[in-house]
């Protein structure tokens, strides 16, 4: 166990450094840093990314976009079409922002250098920073029997616990009612 941790420590520090640079420079160096991360074959725990976002305290808004599980669409959903056609919940309330951070921390997010991109974006979490830049997490919805949730963090392939979408729906149910989505989300109220 100690050898595994020691082997992964340098990769974790590289990844944390990249995220810190991204947030502090407003995203100017992220494309180059993503290439460096992938070329090193990073396969690290991404929980520290979320801690970094929370620690800096620069989050102004959290927005959750999603579509109802198993709903069908004419074309494969992407981040942009999810913003256009999905339901959304937005908050600037720091308690709800912290709650979203806690949900992501508990989702066992892992970076994967070769997670693939054959999945469809069904949930998206956007952290808007005070400088106007966005930090985005995109996820698919797991089908029965899948033990991993595919996704991305600012174009970096990640995986997460397949229970994450349900936690996101419960989070949305705590926010003010969105009449367009209430028929679906009401079952998560009071949970």
Image (tube, rainbow, N blue to C red):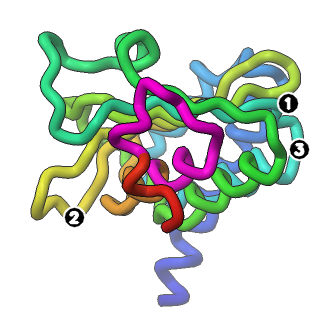
Q: Nearer the viewer, mark 2 or mark 1?
A: 2
Label 2 sits on residue: 147
Mark before the other along the chain sequence, 1 or 3: 1
191 to 1, vertically: above or below: above
Mark pair 1, 3: CA separation: 11 Å
Nearer the observer, 115 or 132: 132
Please give left or right for residue 28 compared with residue 94 in the image. Answer: left
In the picture as drawn, the residue positioned furthest to the bottom comes out as 1
Q: Which residues are magenta?
A: 169-185
From the image, tell me which residue sits under label 1: 24
Mark with earlier residue (2, 1): 1
User: In the picture, residue 72 is in which quadrant?
Assistant: top left
- In this rendered view, identify the residue nearer to me: 108 or 7: 108
Classify mark 2: helix, strand or loop: loop
Instruction: Name the residue: 83% across, 23% down.
Output: 25
In this view, the residue in front, 82 or 111, is 82
| Place of residue 173 in the rendered image (x, y in percent of width and height, measured from the top left) | 53, 49
Residue 87: x and y, percent? Answer: 43, 26
Task: Kindly identify the residue that appears in the image at 73 percent across and 15 percent down.
Answer: 28
Q: Residue 57 — which label?
A: 3
User: What is the C-alpha distance between the residues marked 3 and 2?
Assistant: 33 Å
Q: Is residue 64 above or below residue 141?
A: above
Which residue shows up at 64% across the image and 39% down it?
176
- Determine the residue positioned at 22% across, 50% down: 142
The x, y position of residue 56, in whole percent, is: 88, 45
133 shown above or below 19: above
Magenta includes 24? Answer: no
């Amino acid at each position: 166990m100690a050898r595994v941790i020691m082997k992964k420590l340098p990769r974790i520090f590289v990844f944390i450094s990249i995220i810190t640079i991204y947030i502090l420079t407003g995203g100017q160096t992220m494309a180059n840093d993503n290439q460096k991360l992938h070329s090193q074959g990073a396969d690290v725990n991404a929980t520290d990314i979320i801690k970094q976002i929370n620690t800096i305290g620069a989050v102004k808004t959290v927005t959750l976009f999603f579509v109802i599980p198993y709903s069908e669409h004419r074309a494969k959903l992407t981040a942009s079409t999810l913003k256009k056609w999905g339901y959304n919940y937005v908050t600037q309330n720091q308690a709800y922002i912290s709650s979203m951070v806690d949900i992501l921390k508990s989702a066992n997010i892992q970076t994967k250098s070769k997670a693939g991109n054959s999945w469809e974006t069904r949930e998206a979490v956007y952290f808007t920073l005070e400088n106007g830049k966005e930090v985005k997490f995109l996820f698919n919805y797991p089908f029965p029997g899948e033990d991993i949730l595919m996704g991305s963090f600012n174009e970096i392939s990640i995986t997460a616990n397949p229970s994450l979408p349900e936690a996101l729906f419960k989070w949305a149910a705590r926010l003010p009612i969105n009449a367009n989505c209430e028929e679906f989300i009401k079952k998560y109220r009071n949970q």
